[in-house]
Every structure is written in structure tokens, then in C-alpha cells.
Image (cartoon, rainbow, N blue to C red):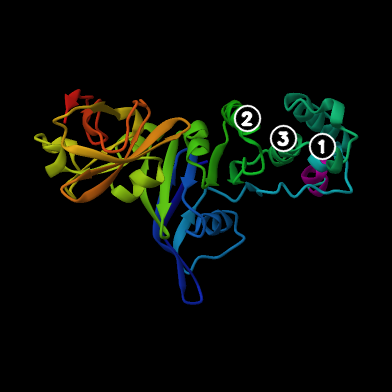
Amino acid sequence: MNVAVDKLTKRFGETHVLRDLSLSVSHGEFVSVLGPSGVGKTTLLKILASLENPDSGSVQCGGRNAVLVFQDYVLFPFLTVHQNVAFGLEARRMPQRDIAARVGRLLSHFGLSDKATEYPARLSAGQKQRVALARALAVEPQLLLLDEPLANLDKNLKRDTALYLRRVQREFGITTICVTHDQEEAMAISDRIAVMLDGEIKQLGTPATVYYQPNSVAVARFMGPVSVLPNSLLACRNASLADQSGTCMLRPEQVVLRPSASGSLLVTEVRLLGLYQFCILEAHGVDYEVFTSHPADLQRGQRVEISRVAVAFEKEPVHETI
């Protein structure tokens, strides 16, 4: 199923939730709508599921065979796993023999055959999510809508489940739209990411494109740690290094800080934050926040230079010392 959203607008009272939002999703594609809380992601999902009506604009889905999986899974607590998965098929009055066969296949596919007679209260978070997915896929939808599908899982389980979810989506070939606020989650499961801020899609592209070639500082910062530095400070001689606002944006893996007595940047703060080092560097009375995944033994009061490994707005990597 192809999905085409054109100039969608939605207000709740005086609050403008969606602003002329447009989005196209191809058949079999997995697209994540990524943004912070309160930007209209779930409202968009509800409109796609026909649970909300837009004030203006159009949605074309080639039919309405869509299933929405909510963040908390909404399993029926008084039904067994088998009965939960069979619920939609029962509602459609499918013959019992066909229901048993389809549910059996899905439970086997999701590794839930031994949980068929269990109730949701006895399941782990990961198992509940698989039951919710199996129930959604049982009715063979053309469009799968996921609301924060990994939000209730711990970090390790989230990583494993993301890979599993992507594999299942590919195997079933279902057009899928997911909304999430988690950048790592979106990058792990998506063909394309639509970055949504203030009720608008600010950028749509592959995970690599929106991460390494953001079209604005706002998108760059939302996609993860980024050092935003003025061209004048970095002496960017190639216009392709910068965006239109006159700044260079570098990801932590693109920055190497080197101690240098003649360096133009003064270290005023340094912290190790797990995967990367965070520094505040001062130049000409202005403080700049810099992130690097190449930690150096730096001290406050030390002067440094930046070796730029690659720059977000460049097509090809560069190696240049600032």
C-alpha cells in the first residue's frame, strides 16, 4: 500500500498541532516519524488510522486496511495469548479451522507457541509486544501503524527487538509507519526518517542523510550530539562545509581535539559522557559546546585545536586541522 499525506492541518482549540504536513510512503517501506513529545506525531498516526479527522488536507491510503499498535499494546487481560491473536479474526467471522491455522502459524513465527494458553499478566514486556504484533498481523493489514513500539523495553531488549521488528516487517512486506521520539530506535528500524518539529516535517531522508547531512541546526541537534561552530572560527574555505546560516556542524565521531600551545580554543570544561567526551571551548569570549567520540586527556585551561575528520554538509570526508 502506498500512503500519501497532503497538506494536513489539525488544531485542538487554539493549539496548531499539524501545519500543512505532507508525507509519502511507498509500498513495503518502513518510515519513522521522529520528533520530541508534543509535536503531533500521535495525532498524525490517529488520522492515518481514522481515529481523528484533520481540519484540512487529504490522506490517500488505497483503502483503509490499517492496524494501529499502541504504545502499551492494549492486550485483553481476560483473554489468553491465543485468544488475543485470534480476536480480529473472530470479529471477522473467519471459520474456526482457518483461525486456528493462522494463529498457530503466527505464534510459531513469533516464538510464542508455548505461551498460547498464558494470560498477558504472566508475560514479559517483550512477549507482550510480540503478542500485539501477532494480533495486528493476523488480519493481514496493508498498513501497519506503530506508536512508540519500543518505549516500554529496557536498552538491551530494545536493541534486540528493533532488529526483530525490522526483520518481521521485511518478511511480511507491510507498509509501516512508526512514530517515536528515540533517535537510535528510528535509525535502527527505518528505511527513511521524517524529522517532525513544531507540527511540520522538517526533513525526510535515509537515516544516514538526516544524521550526517541535516538541513538545519534544529534537525542536527535533535538527531544527536552535534558541535555547531561558526565558519569564521573554523576558517571554512569550502562553502560545502557549511549550511546557509554560516555554521559548520560536526558529529562526535567527526571531531578530534588535540592539545596545542598555539591552539585558538581554550578548554574551560571537560566531561566524559559514556560514548563521547563533552567540552566547553572558549574563543574570543564566546563559549562553544563540542562533542567528540575520540576522548583526549584534556585539562581545564589547556589550549587545543580541532582535527576535523568529516563535516556533516560535505559529500566526501575531509581531514583538516583547525
Report if residue 199 is visible in the image: yes
Residue at image location 48% in from the left, 35% down from the top: 190
Q: State yes or no: discs 1 and 3 in contact (Cβ < 8 Å).
A: no
**Start-end of magenta stretch:** 86-91
Q: Residues within 10 Å of mark 2 (few under 14, many from 20)?
A: few
The chief SS type of the magenta part is helix
Asked whether, in this view, residue 218 is left or right of residue 27, the answer is: left
- The amino acid type, in three-letter code, at marker 1 is Leu
Tell me how far mark 2 sits from mark 1, CA to CA. 18 Å
Q: State yes or no: discs 3 and 2 in contact (Cβ < 8 Å).
A: no
Residue matched to label 2: 156
Asked whether, in this view, residue 226 is left or right of residue 311, the answer is: right
Tell me how far mark 1 sits from mark 3, CA to CA. 8 Å
Residue at image location 48% in from the left, 32% down from the top: 274
Between 102 and 76, the residue placed more toward the observer is 76
Q: Name above or below for residue 248 compared with residue 275.
A: below
Residue matched to label 3: 126
Q: x and y percent of residue 196 in the render?
A: 42, 52
Q: x and y percent of residue 256 in the render?
A: 28, 27
- Tell me the quarter of the picture where residue 22 sits: bottom left
